[in-house]
Each structure stands twice: as structure tokens, then as C-alpha cells.
Image: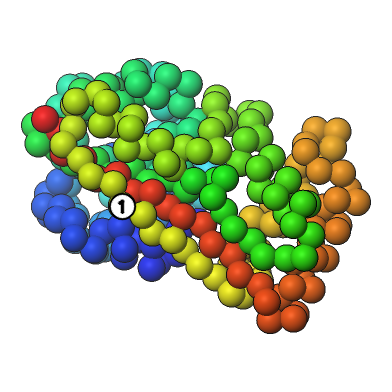
């Protein structure tokens, strides 16, 4: 889940016209579209797509806001006509696409002339978490970054954030630039990104995951102790590509 300050950083210098048609790829529960609608007072077509409709929590509320949610696998050809959208928002989804080059060409196809895309992704291997057990923390971060979660991920790449610019730039289809926002926390409390990141690892315990139960328990205890000693820090870099269709 994005924090408000991450959104504010992403859209600090971005202009979106009020009647723009907008697509959110990997929309989950459409929080991004709700943010955009409120920030820009959008009145145009707002569509969110996600591989799993079970992510459309609060769909009735979103429908009341004029947001349409569709279950679509972005790894496949997007079922939209050419030149459909003025703006595409794409967050933490690119690594899940099986053929990223073809996907970017498809995004270019459905954008209108001089349409804009913002693609945001954490660079998972660049996550930083302080603690005393350096070996275990490094293992957890690396394995989490490169763990293919079955059922909804078609692909994964722990370096995806640092690769975004290259993926888009090499196509020659967009005129774009790259930026980075480093989200830093010093509180390990429920609702914080680091708290959810570490606790999420309880779902990846062997035999189907990458940590033993003992390792997970040691990891969690180490982070909690580090926080109690007032030495805790967590940071996660978001790479932000802003491109305009050529």
C-alpha cells in the first residue's frame, strides 16, 4: 500500500487534464485511482485492471465514484482499442509480466497521441532493514525479492526497479525520465511498511517458502529488539518512470 507522501512525490509535477481517460494497471482496490480522481477532480473514464478480482475490495464504493474495475491479466494482450487512454498508471506490477517488451508496446498502442505513462516499482533487492543478524536479514531480503509467488505472479525480478528506465528507453516509443523516492521509516508498528514487509514473510516458511520457522521467529525477534533499542530503520526505494508517447 502506498503512503500518501509517496503519491504526493510521484505526482508533484504531473499535470493531468480533468477529462482525461485513465487506466491503472495492477489496481488492487483502486486506491491509486481514488487518489487521482480527488487530486485532479477527474471526470473522464477511469478503469482499473487486476489479474484477480478478489482484490477489488470495496468495489461498490469505487463504482459509485465512477471507477470501473476489470479482471484482466496484464501479461496478455490488453483488450482495449488503440488510442484509448490519456494516462496510464502502473505500480508494482511490471515484474509480474512474462514478456515486458511486448507489454510496453501494448501500453504504447492503447495510449493516445502524446499520452503519458507513469510506471512505479520498488527495487526489492535494495530494501534496507537494520538489525543485529546481518546474514539472516540479507537472506530474507534477497529471497523475498526473488520469490515467485504462485497464483498471481507470472514472473519476478528483484532488480525490477532499477531496470524500468532501460525497459522503456530501449523501445524508442516514449520520451521519458527516471526518478527515485526512498521511503524511510523508523517505527516498527502495525500499518508501517516495514512491519508489513517483515510479517508478510510468515507466509513464506518452508516447505513452500524460503525461511524455516526458526529463521522467521529469529528475524522477527531481532527486528523487534532493534526497534526497542531505538536503532531500527527501514527504507524501500521506489523508481518512477515518467514517459510521453512518441
Per the image, label 1 sits on a secondary structure element best described as strand
Q: In this view, does 15 lie above or below 124?
A: below
Q: How many marks?
A: 1
- Give x and y (percent) for residue 166: 33, 32
Residue lying at 77% horizontally and 51% vertically, measured from the top left: 135
**Residue depicted at 46% across the width and 55% down the height:** 237
Q: In which quarter of the image is the C terminus?
A: top left
182 or 38: nearer the viewer = 182
Instruction: Report if residue 62 is visible in the image.
Output: no
Q: Is the residue 118 above or below the residue 192 in the image?
A: above
Q: Is residue 133 visible?
A: yes
Category of crowding for the residue at label 1, using alpha-carbon neighbours closer than 10 angstroms: few (below 14), some (14–19), many (at least 20)? few
The furthest residue to the right: 214
Measured from the top left, where is residue 207 in percent x and y?
86, 33
Colour style of the rendered protein structure: rainbow
- The residue at the point 61 percent across, 75 percent down is 187
Question: Can you identify the residue that label 1 sits on?
Answer: 179
For the residue pair 171 and 54, the one nearer the viewer reads as: 171
Q: In which quarter of the image is residue 205?
A: top right
Q: Taking 47 as reference, is 217 above or below it?
A: below
Q: Where is residue 186 in the image (x, y as percent from the top left)?
A: 59, 74
Left or right: where does residue 10 sit relative to residue 219?
Answer: left
Q: Which residue is drawn at 66% across and 35% down?
A: 147
Between 21 and 241, the one nearer to me in the picture? 241
Looking at the picture, how far across and down is residue 34, in whole percent? 34, 57
Above or below: residue 192 compared with residue 1: below
Amino acid at each position: 500500500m502506498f503512503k500518501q507522501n509517496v503519491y504526493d512525490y510521484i505526482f508533484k509535477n504531473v499535470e493531468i487534464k480533468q477529462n482525461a481517460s485513465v487506466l491503472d494497471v495492477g489496481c488492487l482496490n483502486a486506491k491509486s485511482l481514488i487518489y487521482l480522481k480527488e487530486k485532479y477532480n477527474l471526470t473522464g473514464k477511469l478503469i482499473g485492471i487486476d489479474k484477480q478480482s478478489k482484490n477489488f475490495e470495496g468495489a461498490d464504493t469505487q463504482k459509485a465514484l465512477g471507477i470501473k474495475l476489470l479482471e484482466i491479466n496484464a501479461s496478455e494482450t490488453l483488450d482495449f482499442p488503440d488510442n484509448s487512454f490519456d494516462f496510464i498508471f502502473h505500480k508494482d506490477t511490471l515484474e509480474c509480466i512474462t514478456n515486458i517488451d511486448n507489454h510496453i508496446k501494448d501500453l504504447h498502442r492503447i495510449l493516445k497521441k502524446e499520452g503519458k505513462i507513469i510506471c512505479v516499482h520498488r527495487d526489492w533487492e535494495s530494501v534496507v532493514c537494520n538489525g543485529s543478524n546481518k546474514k539472516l536479514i540479507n537472506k530474507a531480503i534477497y529471497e523475498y525479492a526473488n520469490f515467485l509467488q504462485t497464483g498471481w505472479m507470472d514472473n519476478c525480478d528483484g532488480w525490477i526497479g532499477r531496470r524500468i528506465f532501460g525497459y522503456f528507453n530501449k523501445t524508442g516509443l516514449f520520451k521519458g525520465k527516471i526518478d527515485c523516492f526512498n521511503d524511510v521509516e523508523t517505527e516498527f508498528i502495525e500499518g508501517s511498511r516495514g512491519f508489513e514487509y517483515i510479517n508478510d514473510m510468515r507466509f513464506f516458511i518452508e516447505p513452500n517458502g524460503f525461511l524455516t520457522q526458526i529463521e522467521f521467529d529469529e528475524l522477527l525477534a531481532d527486528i523487534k529488539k532493534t526497534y526497542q533499542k531505538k536503532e531500527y530503520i527501514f527504507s524501500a526505494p521506489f523508481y518512477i518512470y515518467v514517459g510521453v508517447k512518441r
